[in-house]
């Protein structure tokens, strides 16, 4: 059966689809409630929905297209899920526990073409985009996992920072956000959703104009073009000056804070001069910028990079602070499992290939 996931429809799209087939908007509201509030796993469980409507949905859609292939649980409560898609591809989704709530990191593509030299996600090139339904379903699969534990826990935050470049799958990304924000369903607050991009400048303009009111994070990782091009090949096509123009458009139009993600690589981009150069680059954007320092998680295939020691991270942080730059050091999650994004998937694909 090649039916698509019902999660791929936004509420408005569901209303339209059912209306074309003779059903009122109230019917779509019922279906939506069963999917996202009651969180059923089969259409037949929608007991107060008209039987003809239930059959219509079952004839054209399925609820689940992902299956749990592997699961790793950390001592800190982090859970990394490896899901198999209906075409056999594997993707990663991560549940993280914070003091402020439960956060899920979702994947948007099968593989990645951005080609950052330090990243496990790009070890296997992109084969396709995920549908919006496949992105939503990652979140729902995690929520079903929480529901099974019967502790009343709900996912409260989403980070779109998994495998792939979200802005390279823009339409499906937007539909995903509209679905999880919808107040009739999961009702996740826009301020609790963060989308990360490697710096697709044209899409930053589109993202700004879409007025989704969710958070934006940009993977910067270097304070100058020479260094950024060395570790992120995307910088050849979209150098920092072009990227900053798009970011300024976002800041001017939204007046929302932005996060610069900065993975710290030992003896590559972690010295005091790099921190000073980064502060200068940020310049008068300081009030609306936060730098998120991320000590590198080593990946076997990228052995040229190592994790800096705590003293180096602390010194870099202090230098930025003295330059009046808002910054933080990302708390580590899942250190005792395959922590780097894409690492579990890469290992599993290699293991299957060896059979």
Image (spheres, rainbow, N blue to C red):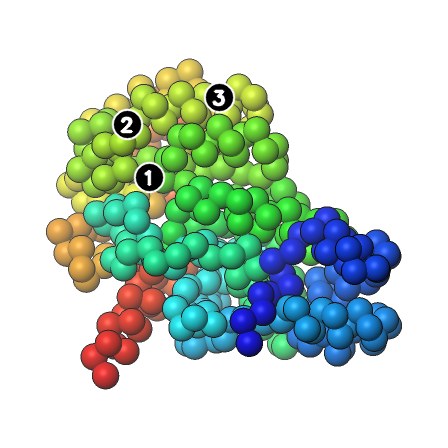
Q: Position of residue 278 (x, y in %)?
A: 30, 26
Residue that appears at 40% across and 26% down: 325
Is residue 63 positioned above or below 18 on the image?
below
Q: CA distance from mark 3 to mark 2?
A: 16 Å
Q: Position of residue 337 (x, y in %)?
A: 35, 68
Which sits earlier in the primary sequence, circle 1 or circle 2? 2
Q: Nearer the viewer, mark 1 or mark 2?
A: 2
Residue 75 lies in quadrant: bottom left
Residue 35 lies in quadrant: bottom right
Residue that appears at 63% across and 61% down: 7
Element class at badge 1 = strand
Residue that appears at 39% across and 57% down: 128
Q: CA distance from mark 1 to mark 2?
A: 16 Å
Q: Nearer the viewer, mark 1 or mark 3?
A: 3
Residue most extreme to the top: 284
Label 2 neighbour load within 10 Å: few <14, some 14-19, many 20+: some
Residue that appears at 30% across and 49% down: 113
Element class at badge 3 = helix
Q: Position of residue 106 (x, y in %)?
A: 48, 56
- Residue 73: in sight, yes or no? no
Res 249 label = 3
Of 200 and 263, which appears nearest the observer? Answer: 200
Q: Quick check: marks 1 and 3 in contact, CB under 8 Å? A: no
Label 3 neighbour load within 10 Å: few <14, some 14-19, many 20+: some
Residue 214 lies in quadrant: top right
Which sits earlier in the primary sequence, circle 3 or circle 2? 2
Of 134 and 297, which appears nearest the observer? Answer: 134
Res 262 label = 1
Residue beneath label 2, please?
Answer: 239
Of 166 and 73, which appears nearest the observer? Answer: 166
- Residue 123: in sight, yes or no? yes
Is residue 179 positioned above or below 91 on the image?
above
């Amino acid at each position: 059966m090649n039916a698509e996931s019902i999660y791929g429809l936004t509420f408005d799209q569901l209303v339209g689809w059912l209306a074309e087939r003779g059903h009122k908007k109230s019917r779509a509201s019922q279906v939506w409630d069963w999917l996202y509030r009651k969180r059923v796993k089969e259409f037949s469980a929608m007991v107060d929905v008209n039987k003809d409507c239930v059959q219509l949905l079952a004839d054209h859609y399925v609820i689940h297209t992902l299956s749990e292939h592997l699961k790793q649980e950390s001592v800190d409560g982090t859970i990394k899920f490896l899901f198999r898609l209906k075409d056999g591809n594997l993707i990663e989704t991560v549940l993280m526990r914070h003091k402020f709530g439960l956060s899920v990191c979702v994947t948007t593509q099968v593989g990645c073409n951005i080609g950052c030299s330090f990243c496990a996600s790009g070890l296997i090139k992109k084969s396709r985009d995920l549908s919006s339904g496949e992105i939503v379903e990652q979140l729902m699969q995690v929520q079903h996992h929480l529901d099974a534990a019967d502790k009343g826990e709900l996912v409260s935050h989403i980070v779109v920072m998994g495998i792939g470049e979200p802005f390279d799958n823009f339409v499906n990304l937007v539909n995903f956000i509209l679905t999880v924000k919808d107040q009739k369903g999961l009702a996740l607050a826009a301020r609790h959703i963060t989308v990360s991009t490697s710096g697709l400048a044209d899409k930053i303009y589109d993202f700004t104009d879409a007025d989704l009111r969710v958070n934006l994070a940009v993977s910067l990782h270097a304070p100058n073009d020479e260094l950024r091009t060395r570790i992120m090949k995307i910088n050849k096509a979209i150098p920092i000056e072009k990227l900053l123009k798009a970011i300024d458009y976002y800041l001017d139009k939204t007046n929302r804070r932005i996060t610069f993600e900065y993975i710290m690589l030992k003896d590559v981009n972690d010295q005091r001069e790099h921190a000073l150069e980064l502060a200068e680059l940020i310049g008068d954007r300081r009030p609306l910028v936060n730098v998120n320092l991320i000590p590198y998680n080593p990946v076997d295939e990228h052995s040229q990079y190592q994790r800096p020691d705590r003293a180096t991270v602390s010194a870099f942080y202090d230098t930025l602070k003295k330059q009046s730059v808002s910054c933080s050091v990302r708390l580590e999650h899942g250190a005792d499992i395959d922590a780097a994004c894409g690492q579990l998937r890469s290992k599993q694909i290699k293991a299957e290939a060896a059979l």
